Amino acid sequence: MPASCVRLMAEGCAVASVLGMLEEREAAARVRVESLREEAARLAEVLEAAEVELGRRVIAREELVEALAASTAEATAEAEAERDAVPPPAPGSVVPPWRDGCR
């Protein structure tokens, strides 16, 4: 067998060996990509659940703020109504002395 044929066979083995290594690396990269896709899908579900929870908490806070504002407005209105219910003394009027049982 001529030396050139031996060299080609040796080079062919080296090429086959390199090709095999590249195929192994490609297969490993495919496995890694699939694993990352699965992880991304799982994280997308977790993110969606967290966004739903955040939305509920934002709504709860907004409703609480509205309820507290309404309660404060009602309390203020009641206090003003009580204050306005008792007429102030007229100028020059005489205030009676305090007695037990009077408020």
Image (cartoon, rainbow, N blue to C red):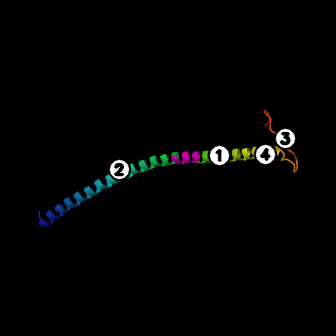
- Quadrant holding the C terminus: top right
Considering only order in the chain, which callout, 4 or 2, is on the residue closer to the N terminus? 2
- The residue where tag 1 is placed is 63
Task: Name the residue that disc number 4 marks.
Answer: 83
Q: Nearer the viewer, residue 17 or 37?
A: 37
The residue tagged 2 is 31
Report, in whole angstroms, how far the alpha carbon at label 1 lies from the one at label 4.
Answer: 30 Å
- Quadrant in which the N terminus is drawn: bottom left
Residues under numbered marks 1 and 3 in contact, where contact means CB atoms less than 8 Å apart: no
- Give the residue type at disc 1: Glu
Magenta stretch encompasses residue 67: no
* Residue 96 - label: 3
Direction bottom: furthest residue: 4
Q: Residue at x 24, y 59 (%)?
A: 18
Q: Nearer the viewer, residue 84 or 96?
A: 96
SS of the residue at dot 1? helix
Q: Amino acid at mark 4?
A: Arg
Task: Say if mark 2 contacts mark 1, CB within 8 Å.
Answer: no
Residue segment shown in magenta: 50-57
Amino acid type of the residue tagged 3 in the rendering: Pro
Identify the element where label 3 is drawn: loop
Give coordinates of residue 47: x percent, y percent: 49, 48
Image marks 3 and 2: residues in contact by CB distance under 8 Å: no
Q: Going by the image, does 101 lie left or right of 48?
A: right
Instruction: Look at discs 1 and 4 and give the one toward the viewer.
Output: 4
